[in-house]
Amino acid sequence: MSDTTTLPEPKLGNQLGAEFLGTFLLVFGGTGAAVLAATVDHGIGYLGVALAFGLTVVVGAYAFGPVSGGHFNPAVTIGLAAAGRFSWKHVLPYVVAQIVGGIVGSAVLLVIASGRAGFSLSDGFATNGYGAHSPEGYGMLPAFVIEFVLTAVFLYVIIGVTGKRAAAGFAPLAIGLTLALIHLISIPVTNTSVNPARSIAPAIFVGGDALVQLWLFILAPILGAIFAGVTYALVTGERK
């Protein structure tokens, strides 16, 4: 007699709760590192912020991935649906849960960050931007291209490491390391989005140009994710 138990599939409500918590962790941990620890004396800098985002995905995927798949990103959800790996009927609920989780993460971060003398939302609050709001002054076209390309790369990796041919148990590590690499490449350009929920959350608190430029950090990642989802099987020969 086997001593293993087949667990029931999580209900949609449980999956949405997991997506909420995972996206909360991603936004609070990643942007929290940027806001609280990147610019202080002897702070963690770009490298530390990149690692913070990668680590939040690793721990979030291990903690909540078995429940919801560990998307924590509207672009990932849409890209997986385009790849035939996720049901389109659950895309909207997932995206809403992710955006709400990100906003709550930014709200909690704001409560903490505003406790420091001299704190101001005008300093950026880890928002994404281009032109005058790019960390190193990159324009709109480079920002769009890098967000599109790196989100596509992110989806290619996610689809690959969660496929049947991949080694079991290592997907969160590969995905987290990929996100850290993506941040190392693109923080100077856009402060790195590749995730509309991550961009929306701080932007709604900062307002102004952060909201004006938000379209790019919603559109480019989603288009990049769809491109990867549609072309992955064509490139690799793997059936959907």
Image: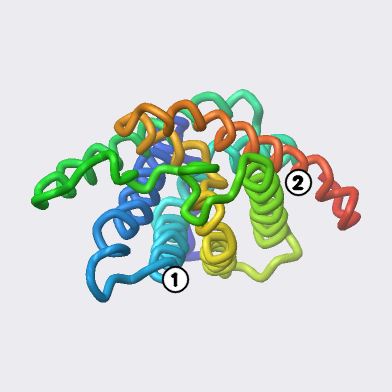
Mark 1 falls on what kind of element?
Answer: helix
Total label count?
2
For the residue pair 64 and 205, the one nearer the viewer reads as 205
For the residue pair 227 and 48, the one nearer the viewer reads as 48
Mark 2 falls on what kind of element?
Answer: helix
> In the rendering, which numbered label is found on residue 163?
none
Residue 238 seen: yes
Nearest to viewer (mark 2 / mark 1): 1
Compared across the picture, whether 51 is left or right of 75 comes to left
Q: Is residue 33 above or below residue 21?
A: below
CA neighbours of label 2 inside 10 A, class few (<14), some (14 to 19), many (20+):
many
Q: Quadrant of residue 177?
A: bottom right
Residue 113 in the image, given as x and y percentages of width and height: 18, 49
Q: Quadrant of residue 229?
A: top right
For the residue pair 218 and 63, the one nearer the viewer reads as 218
For the residue pair 58 and 16, the one nearer the viewer reads as 58
Q: Is residue 209 above or below residue 36?
A: above
Residue 169 seen: no
Q: Quadrant of residue 48?
A: bottom left
> In the rendering, which numbered label is found on residue 47?
1
Residue 53 in the image, given as x and y percentages of width and height: 43, 59
Q: Residue at x 53, y 49 (%)?
A: 190
Q: Residue at x 59, y 34 (%)?
A: 216
Compared across the picture, whether 81 is left or right of 209 comes to right
Residue 39 in the image, given as x and y percentages of width and height: 29, 63
Residue 121 in the image, given as x and y percentages of width and height: 26, 39
Q: What residue is disc 2 on?
A: 228
The type of residue carrying mark 2 is: Ala
Q: Is residue 107 above or below residue 156?
A: above
The type of residue carrying mark 1 is: Leu
